[in-house]
Image (cartoon, helix red, strand yellow):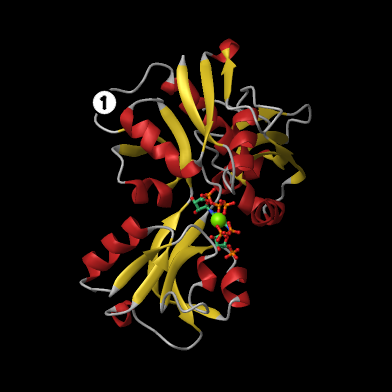
Amino acid sequence: MLRIAVPNKGSLAEPAAEMLREAGYRQRRDSRELVLPDADNGVEFFFLRPRDIAVYVGTGTVDVGITGRDLLLDSESPATEHLRLGFARSTFRFATQAGQMNDVREVAGRRVATSYPVLVAAYLREQGVVPSEVVRLDGAVETAIRLGVADVIADVVETGTTLRAAGLDVFGEPILKSEAVLVRRAGVEEPAGLDVLTRRLQGVLTAREYVLMDYDVPTEFVEQAVAITPGLESPTVSPLHNRDWAAVRAMVRRSETNRVMDALYEVGARAILVTSIHACRL
Ligand SMILES: Nc1ncnc2c1ncn2[C@@H]1O[C@H](COP(=O)(O)OP(=O)(O)OP(=O)(O)O)[C@@H](O)[C@H]1O
Ligand SMILES: O=P(O)(O)OC[C@H]1O[C@H](OP(=O)(O)OP(=O)(O)O)[C@H](O)[C@@H]1O
Ligand SMILES: [Mg+2]
């Protein structure tokens, strides 16, 4: 049985459960359940705090886990990124009172509050900047400056709403770009069953990222049309009853759907249909 750690709370919990559900696994109905066997799929889920997941994976107590890249790096655990999962995207940044600082070098001699002290200390070391102190807080880091605990904060930024509400502005380069990742123990062989989990999750990622596009096009323009929709390997081209026309089917990036439809229409394609992909194995 592959033992999989899943975040029990916080921003990662719901999207992680949703992704596993889409990949065909059982998910818990009650948020108080801590362990959930899924014998039909040969896996067992352990619901753990997101910050602890890399630690469990690093010691080998569980085989793999879903956590954030920022949490993985801050844990210093011997766990490694196996697959990017594309949700809970954020940047990790320095911020201070609006208009006060422009460069990471200004952090020298200042107090920095963060929930990610290892990550911040490592970054400052790399930049050759020595702060006076790195203050570790559990959350609500944005308030630390107003309360006089720190001069600068380093925190997760998604929309920037929380920073703005606290009258703070980011400065310097982003310390890190984070997203949810599947992690496994570093330096050991892949656990049995991880290949199946990986293919299933990749299937969900592809189904989310691509759509299926069908259209009819006069045979004389097929080459021009398939150049616009080359698909992943090669598009399917089928004859129509009217021999002057062909039907084409290809996968297209969801984000490019309308641009591609416009381009196809221009070369003479008609009856252009877009369908969501429910599941796939590439
Ligand atoms: N607003 C956000 N947008 C995207 N990702 C976020 C956001 N807030 C936190 N994360 C990500 O979630 C992970 C942290 O999860 P964790 O559960 O510890 O904190 P949280 O989501 O802030 O939950 P809580 O504050 O309720 O404890 C990190 O990988 C972080 O990058
Ligand atoms: O850029 P935004 O879209 O505003 O999102 C970023 C905020 O979201 C998270 O906070 P959360 O609500 O989890 O509170 P916390 O600080 O107590 O963890 C994170 O720690 C930031 O504060
Ligand atoms: Mg939080």
| Residue located at (42% from left, 29% from top) | 64
Q: Residues within 10 Å of mark 1 (few under 14, many from 20)?
A: few
257 w.r.t. 113: above or below: above
Give residue 230's position: percent from left, percent from top. 54, 41
103 w.r.t. 22: above or below: below
Residue nearest the observer in this picture, 83 or 235: 83
Give residue 91's position: percent from left, percent from top. 47, 61
Which residue, as the protein is rendered here, is positioned at the far left? 128
| Residue located at (23% from left, 73% from top) | 130
111 w.r.t. 225: above or below: below
Read off the residue under disc 1: 188
Give residue 167's position: percent from left, percent from top. 57, 81
**Residue 230 showing in the rendered view:** yes
Q: How many marks?
A: 1
| Residue located at (73% from left, 36% from top) | 245
**Residue 182 showing in the rendered view:** no
- The three-letter amino acid code for the residue at tag 1 is Val
Give residue 232's position: percent from left, percent from top. 51, 37
